[in-house]
Image (cartoon, grey):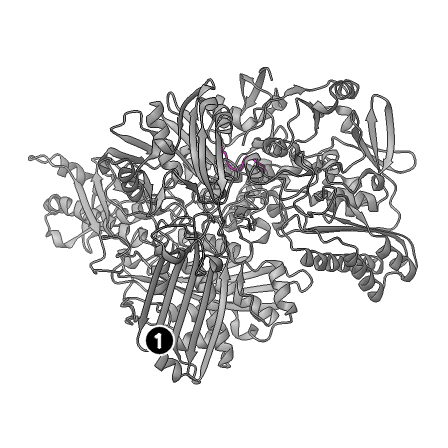
Amino acid sequence: MQLPPFEYIRPESLAEGLQALAEHGDKIAIMSGGSDLLINMKFRLDGPEYLLSLNGLPELQLIEELDDGSLRIGAGCKLTELANNALIKERYPALQAAIFSVGSRHVRNMGTIGGNICLDTRCWYTNQSETWRDTRDGCFKTDSEQCHVIKTTTKCHALSSTDSGPMLIALDASVVLASQAGERVVPVREFYQDDGLDHTVLEPGEVLVAVIVPPPRGRAVFAKLAQREGLDFAAGSFAAAVSGSNEKLDSVCLVMGSVAPEPRVMEQAGKILMDAGLTDESIDAAAGAARLSLDEVTNLFTPPGYKKRLIRALVKDALTELRDQAVRG
Amino acid sequence: MARVKEDTAVVGKNWARLDGADKVSGRSIFADDVRLTGMLYGKVVRSPHVHARILSIDTSAAEALAGVKAVITPEDAKDIWLGINQPLLPTESVMHVGHEVAAVAAISEEIAARAAALIKVEYEPLTELLDVEKAMEDDALQLHEKAKGNIAWKQEEEHGDPDAVFAACDVIREDTYITNPSHNCFAEYHVCVADFSSPAKLKMWTPTQTAMLFQQSLAAGFKLPVSDVRLLTLNTGGGFTGRTSTRPHHFLAALLSRKAGRPVRLRSAGDEEFIMSRAGGRVTYKLRSGATKDGKLKVIEADLLFDTGAYIESQMIVTTLTSKYIHALYPIEASRYRGRLIHTNNLPYYFHHGGGIAQFQFALGQHMDALARDLGMDPVEFNLQNAVEEGYTTMDGAFYASCGLKECIEKTAALAGWKDKYGKLPKFKGIGIGIGAMASGAKGLFRHDTSAAFVKVTEDGKASLFVGIPDMGQSSHTTMAIICAEVLGISPEDINVVSGDTDSDPLDVGAFIQRGTFNTGNATKNAAMDARDQLTKKAAELLEVEEAVLVFRDRRVYPEGQEDKAIPFKKVVYETLHSQEGRFVMGRGFYSSPLEKGTMAYSFGAQIAEVTVDPGTGVVTVDKMTASHDVGRAINPRIVEGQMDGQIFSGMSQVLYEEILMEDGQVMNPSRLDYKMPRAFEMPEVEHIIVESIDPNGPFGAKEVGEGPIVCTMQAIANAVTNAIGTQVKEMPLSPWRVIKAIKD
Amino acid sequence: MAKQLITLIVNGDSYEVAAAPHQTLLEVMRDILNMTGTKRGCTAGSCGVCTVNGEQGEAILSCLALAVEWDGRPVTTIEGVEEGDKLHPVQQAFLEYGAVQCGFCTPGLVMSAKALLDVNTDPTEADINEAMAGAICRCTGHIKVKKAIREAAKALREREVNDGAS
């Protein structure tokens, strides 16, 4: 498969890049590592006239500790670099696990954290070659007003597939979005939206430049289930962060990945744990609630009934691990 | 009866493959690496419809595009047929998604792709037939005139009186199993380079398991004398029974080349690799068997229903082979068999690794395991009690001149610690056994099953060995060099294997149906012996002894028992070539089974799988495989292990992961990402046991190891899963959701 | 879409080539430089056969790298692994321990393994799996490949000891 032709823009500075973004509107695509975008372009899902390469911009490659103890990670940092970063390993082992679970070593050597956070949604009716898609009518992603997954819907149900996104939400992280108008900081929880076609709040002319992870409070866990351990998108993933004791939790954030166009924060399951702490019964109940909160969606290989069961098992195992972490100390 | 293992200097030692250094350093050339002057790049236009009438094809825009050198449509392909009923390009209707409709050749891949997109084809959709059961209904649409009831092929066979034997059985069991569509996923995508710029002679570079059959099929298609088609096989990037016959792209590249007058390369890009064929179609196996309460298996009945897709090519081989493997493992008193290939508008079907035999054994092995449990027997005991032995002749007429099956079962069970584990493992841990047989060669599928070889001995004491068998990774060329070196008393490193050009290759049916080591190995041995015979006269003269006492070993020749008198092999060759009358040392040999039908050698194996099932997710982890194979004699033990490893991987991959997911006649997961196969993480520990029964007819006692092991793998893993969860999962692959469903039901 | 004049530094040699921005490193190496040791596989980042090593020796997929992005940055391919006329310990181990069958994925496997062993000569089983999971090989089923990597690591460790001693 070959790429379609495009004009290549490699800015000397972020400002120059933002100017190119402002200038070319919707005709420009942003490439970070390229390991997702270029495949979509080979599939002719994206056909930008201009390609803005963020590779090599030093301001996007910084990892710095802020005064309040937060960690600011440049969007251009390669996933391998982050997975090996001593500070991340020590303070945010669950985030390290989430980053480490992305793709394969090869993909992580090329892909960046910014790219993974923005990772496009996926659907098996869409992420196919152009000739494959020609056998069917189009869908929301390909300029038609229908969805092959849910015939009656009015929006795209392609799945969020980022592994880092759910974890960053659980850790209460924020992203820094820059445009020529300046920077804004958006909690990752508010960065995503429930629309496979337009799954982030990024505005035209805007680029994700950094992610800020607040100082760790308590414990966190990340779990992913894919059919094989290396190079596979999640059939379901789960990220959780809690503080307090198993008997009385002070905060809880539970997030599922790869179940909807956005990472899904599980309010109901979270509330169960807030009320009851981490016990065998509450874990069971939270896992059950997680299962019930899912939509009947099967746009990747797993049958919907199975996916629900899988999520319950994943949540149960991960929460048990979280509980045991406290016991182990 | 135990035969003595011949004392050998070269055979039986670990040898690195002769082409290995080139392969690890990027010097090996594959068809995609071929660069020819003026070479063009082809692209195929494919049907987006499952079943539709072609109303018109407009190529004008494509032809007008600068850089386009040839466009072909069904008009250009008249009277070119593939297999039995497939026109190269359909003149009336497309029969499946991805069906070839037209093709272009241009000066770059980019232009070719653009030109292909410019070809406008108008279709009128027709009724689609995607389901085997529907295709067999009385009022079903008829896809091919000659295939009544959409039955493309049917075979029925009965031995003994099955009904009477069933009536005398104490325990009768019935099961239905399903295997889903799959794909070979060899590393090297489908590709060929055709040079037909001189229309009298076609040259083609392409990966293949059988240059002979490719040559014959292209010659028939283009109505050329066979010798005017020259097949050039470079390295072949994996076969797995997926490269045993020509496909449309071979013919299309040739046609484009003839029309453009320039060489053309045609390679499948991206999902084309999956939509041009399936390796396996969906198959339903209905099995019934009976035993007496003393644990003696008496009768087996099998009914196979294959979704063969839109066309039929050589798929009937699967029905034929399956009918033979009903009788292969157990001496039974009666059998009944029916195999049917059914046409649908699914992709045409070829074969996957295991050739249908391993997939059948997935069914039979599970069924036997269940029967053993019905009888209250340990499956290992059941297999030991019922397994065939040396000297047995099956109901189908196969004679086992060597058979290490019971030795395989016993050694595997002992090494795996079966007795301490079976029935004693914690919940959701399981252990299972699978056993198998495999013929070396299959005379009868073709009129002959011949392999031939030439050995040219050169005056530096080395030799060139000419063979026609392709090496697609199984290391046959190195195996042949070892056999040749053993006979001549030199080192495999002294042998230059020459192969891959039908203009000079000796006849060879090819590298499939497990004929390489046995057939080509015997041919090579015969050729090397012929060459050696041409040297003995001079050697005897130089040593002043009788020819009969000469020993050729370690690059020397000496009278038996008198190594001190040894003279260098090189000297014998030199003196022979430089004799007064002048000489040329060129041995020739061939081998074909002396039987009218069938082969002289059968391999056997047993494997034990240990698995863990996650009851929450249904994910099966293979913890350990203990594998044995009766290879007759291991010519190159490390390669034998490598063959076992690859098949354990492929068997595990097929039984747990691989599935072409079809929806509306279309492949939903046509990529290396989404068509799941395990990788490094998933591979279990493997223990190898090589059993050497020393086959009386094999070269140095050897028989196959190229496909026998995979026959054991799928059933062993499936049986271990059954053992872990207490119920069978009867549909392959055993994807997590199928395992969960089985647990819940 | 205009072509750009770039300098690719492959195996220590500089090549000035005109590449269109949409040409991948794989395409430029194979089709312009005629370096066919790096194989073309799925071209979508899933099979690993096109693996080459980047400037830090890291394994990258040349089918998903734009050639223009590698202007002036050193790349090592399978053709540049041998040490003089001798095979690199990784290549030697692949050959000796039966990690090579059909050979099509071998260049990518060797480059993936070399990327690991260049920075870690004492890898755990998990390290090996992690380094190799981006690649696929039906022939060997990864079993002998993993064995070869363990053996190559051993050879490299011995070499480190010897180098340290001399």
Looking at the rendering, which quadrant does residue A195 occupy? Answer: top right
Q: Residue C42: say if magenta.
A: yes
Apparent side of residue A1 relative to residue B257 in the rendered image (left or right) = right
Q: Residue B719: say if magenta.
A: no
Looking at the rendering, which quadrant does residue A91 occupy? Answer: top right
Identity of the amino acid at label 1? Ile
Q: Which residue is mark 1?
A: B332
Viewer-proximal residue among B393 and B321:
B321
Q: Quadrant of the C terminus of chain B?
A: bottom right
Say which residue appears at 80% left-offset and 58% top-offset.
A319
Say which residue appears at 56% left-offset and 24% top-offset.
C23
Residue A130, position in %: x, y? Answer: 57, 34
- Residue B67 lies, with reference to residue B583, above or below; the image says above
Say which residue appears at 57% left-offset and 71% top-offset.
B723
Q: Chain of mark 1?
A: B
Looking at the rendering, which quadrant does residue A14 occupy? Answer: top right
Q: Quadrant of the N terminus of chain B?
A: bottom left
| Residue B262 in view here | no
User: Magenta-highlighted stretch: main secondary structure?
Assistant: loop
Residue B510, position in %: x, y? Answer: 31, 47
Apparent side of residue C18 relative to residue B740 in the rendered image (left or right) = left
Circle 1 SS class: loop
Viewer-proximal residue among B115 and C100:
B115
Please state the extent of the stretch shown in magenta in the rendering. Answer: C39-45
Residue B713, position in %: x, y? Answer: 48, 61
- Residue B179 lies, with reference to residue B744, above or below; the image says above
Viewer-proximal residue among B43 and A110:
B43
Mark 1 residue crowding within 10 angstroms, few (<14) / some (14–19) / many (20+): many
| Residue B2 in view here | yes
Residue A11, position in %: x, y? Answer: 72, 19
Viewer-proximal residue among B221 and B543:
B221
